Amino acid sequence: MKYAFSFLAVIALILIAGLGSQIPGMQYLFGVAIPYLAIMLFVGGFVYRIIQWAKSPVPFSIPTTCGQGASLDFIKQDKLDCPTKISEVVGRMFLEIFLFRTLFRNTKSEIHNGPKVTHESSKWLWLFGLLFHYSFLVIIIRHMRLFVDPIPFWLSAIEGVDSMLQIGAPTLYLSSVVLLLGILFLFGRRLINVQVRYISLNNDYFPLVLIFAIAVTGILMRYFLRTDIDIVTIKSLALGLVTFSPVIGAQIGTIFYIHLFLVCTLLAYFPFSKLMHMGGVFMSPTRNMANDSRAKRHINPWNDPTIKPHSYAGYEDEFREFMVDAGIPVDKELPAAKDEA
Amino acid sequence: MAVPKLEQLSKSVVQGPSLSTGAVPTKDWTDVPAIFKPGNYAYQAKQEKVEYLNSQEGLNFPNAREWSPEDDDWKLPENWQDIILKGLRERLDKFRSLKIFMDCCVRCGACADKCHFFLGTGDPKNMPVLRAELLRSVYRNDFTLAGKLLGKMAGAREMTVGVLKEWFMYSYQCTECRRCSVFCPYGIDTAEVTMMLRELLHLVGVGINWILEPASNSNRTGNHMGLQPHTFKDNVDFLAEDIENLTGVKINHSFNRKGAEVLFITPSADVFAEPGLYTAMGYLLLFEHIGLDYTWSTYASEGGNFGLFTNNELMKKLNGKMYAEAKRLGVKYIIGGECGHMWRVIHQYMDTMNGPADFLEVPKSSITGTTFNNAASTKMVHISEFTADLIKNHKLKLDKSRNAHVKATYHDSCNPARAMGLMDEPRYILDHVVDNWVEMPENTIREQTFCCGSGTGLNTDEIMELRMRAGLPRANAVKHVIDKHDVNTLSCVCAIDRATLTSLMNYWNPGCNVCGVSELVGNALVMDGENRQELDEGLRTLV
């Protein structure tokens, strides 16, 4: 029932924001103070985590080679899966980060009577993972319209594409629907796939439920509770926040405070959670290193030069007699045999 | 331990209640203790082996004692918890991989069914993600803000004896094969996690004999088998005699010879037992065929490195002999035989740990003139690279019909495939030495290859059932090509494989031989001045 806890936690957050923002004078806390705090925690925490990671060295060159390495001229190298040049590593990382290439490779293994072990391609996680992340990205970019004035052309263009189906008024954004679908898949998968269910922690359900609540409150605001909020006041608050001169308007709407508070929670939670995979994926040594450790020496800063092999001299001392008997060359001859005459 | 009959185990892996057959455990994994009973663990290291290693300069193997995993009391040092946590802190500071792998996992489960141990046992803690969670839960508890604030709620666990026992059980049910790392979207490599777990366990005197005894042997005698110099020489001499009996060709080989052009190092198992012996005969024939100026060494008579399965210090110390001997003998470069984990150490660790090898030259084949730029710094060439180059340059007289008795398939060993990228060189060789060879199904070869199930020092007989279970995915893919293409030979480039796949085939696919690629090369070579008997089974023919 780990997921139940996550729902409770998010409901509590919603109540805090919903009720709290109603208390006179608290709008400033929810509209200004908490957003600033959340941003500070997010940026500070993110940077702190990256620095913490970077402080530990990469002592050995440990790329996971997923294809043929560079060797003889007539053996064709798989440059993306077994890169040796920086440009090839960049290519590998680009496809990993932007197209989730590794998940594309995913298989599902099953054991049938016989026994017969099968490994079938399974791309669902790749597909929905990709949809989830990209729709989230588009939504974040769309929200930039709140922080800039006038709206730049490229932003309007993205919005245009996102609403190209022209459904309803205000027009439905594809990203809203796709994000919800992505969340439902990822959440459903955690419940239905027995293996994933068994490994899932609170830490896994909570961000999904939180993002789900953020998406739902956003959708409510845009499509269903539009009259409850004042978009002009929201925009002036947002502009005020980024220019460090925030102004809280009177009729901003409770649903907005809930939405904003949940976003703040996500931002503050981010650096202290698994969501840091966003930063970690860039720094994973098995993916971001070139497979050239025999061609170029990789340096380990803590390599201990005092660790020496058991010496040849010590070895020969122990076995010299046997070696001489067997005709194996030795560095030091046996002492002349004692005269026993 | 008696191994269950084939029919029993065949049924058990499909129907036995386990997470891989769809039965959901009723208890949370944190509430399931590790219970040791005969057959489910590899024997603890003998006191004298631990004492010996601990006495060696630069090594730390404390708490040597008589103990048993089956006992409640493991006779840990009084402050064992501090030792472990301090050890973990130290390793977090030394390995970025460990920090990232502790922090980034999202538990997407992509790795879950990629592990041969999980597929064969169905034990949830053999899912790579849970294996890592065994350590991650402790990491959260003591090293993360969320864990400190929220405890169990955030998936944190205190370091207890129970947790330590789990670490022991499951870090020795992982062969560090890296298959999970191929499928992890962040490249999280369970091999790194397992290595850290094993290092931490050694800090409190918890290790297995099948690893520490060969490692001690290797330190003292130069090889895992404990062969002393004269015995090592005798063994190779016997192989040379066998070759002479079979082919009429006299082999000129030497030991510890200063001034040779090349030092040749291969796993000692190749000169010790079947079927590795035939692979070693292949090397001898090949070098004779091209007249290579090379020497064996009795001091550096081990290609493998069981230090890799214990800790960094021991790995470095054992590996150091290769360069030390190359320097002493004054060779130009080193050729390494067929071995999996040996090549992980050479390719990814050796130059970093024991380089720079500035006393050696960039390897250049004196036969073909090819410079091996991919080994420009390490100065060590893989026998398959060396052989493939010879074939490409038409330097070998090969007669494929001499392998007419062979219908082969090729097993990519974990480390050459996933920690080196050596995949097509052996295939190129196979194309030229056998008429008939086929690939196993695509999700079981190359970077997706399945481990033999007994790597990283787990090839010990007391855990035979576990090994047969863990080897099932590999064996099953072999069975596929046996049924479909009448394959009778499983070729590979790994000494551990040659031993372990033999047991695995005898169990799951009786009648299928296991061989090194170099054995097939040796079979096919047309030697100058040969006086060859009818060798219906190549070098294995009894005459």
Image (tube, coloured by chain):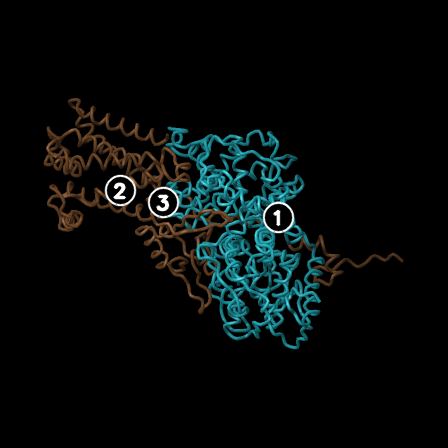
Chain colours: A brown, B cyan
> In this rendering, would B533 be left or right of A98?
right
Q: Residue furthest top?
A: A23
Q: Secondary structure at mark 2?
A: helix
What residue is disc 2 on? A181
Residue A312 x, y percent position in the rendering: 65, 55
- Report x, y in % for residue B189: 45, 47
What is the chain letter for disc 3?
A
Quadrant in the picture for the C terminus of chain A? bottom right
Q: State which quarter of the image contains the N terminus of chain A.
A: top left
Instruction: Report the chain holding disc 2.
Output: A
Q: Is residue B471 visible?
A: yes
Marks 2 & 1, CB-CB < 8 Å contact: no
Marks 3 and 1 sit apart, C-alpha to C-alpha, by 35 Å
Q: Are marks 2 and 3 in contact (CB under 8 Å)?
A: no
Instruction: Tell me where residue B23 appears, x and y as whole percent.
Output: 46, 37
Q: Are marks 2 and 1 on the same chain?
A: no
Identify the residue position indicated by label 3 in the image: A280
Secondary structure, mark 1, is helix
Q: Chain of mark 1?
A: B
**Comes first in the chain, label 2 or label 3:** 2
Q: Amino acid at mark 2?
A: Leu
Please state which amino acid type lies under the numbered disc 1.
Answer: Ala
Q: Residue furthest bottom?
A: B529
Which of the two discs, 2 and 1, sits closer to the camera?
2
Q: Nearer the viewer, residue A181 or A79?
A: A181
Camera-nearest label, 2 or 3: 2
Asked if disc 3 and disc 1 are in contact, CB closer than 8 Å, the reply is: no
Residue underneath mark 1: B215
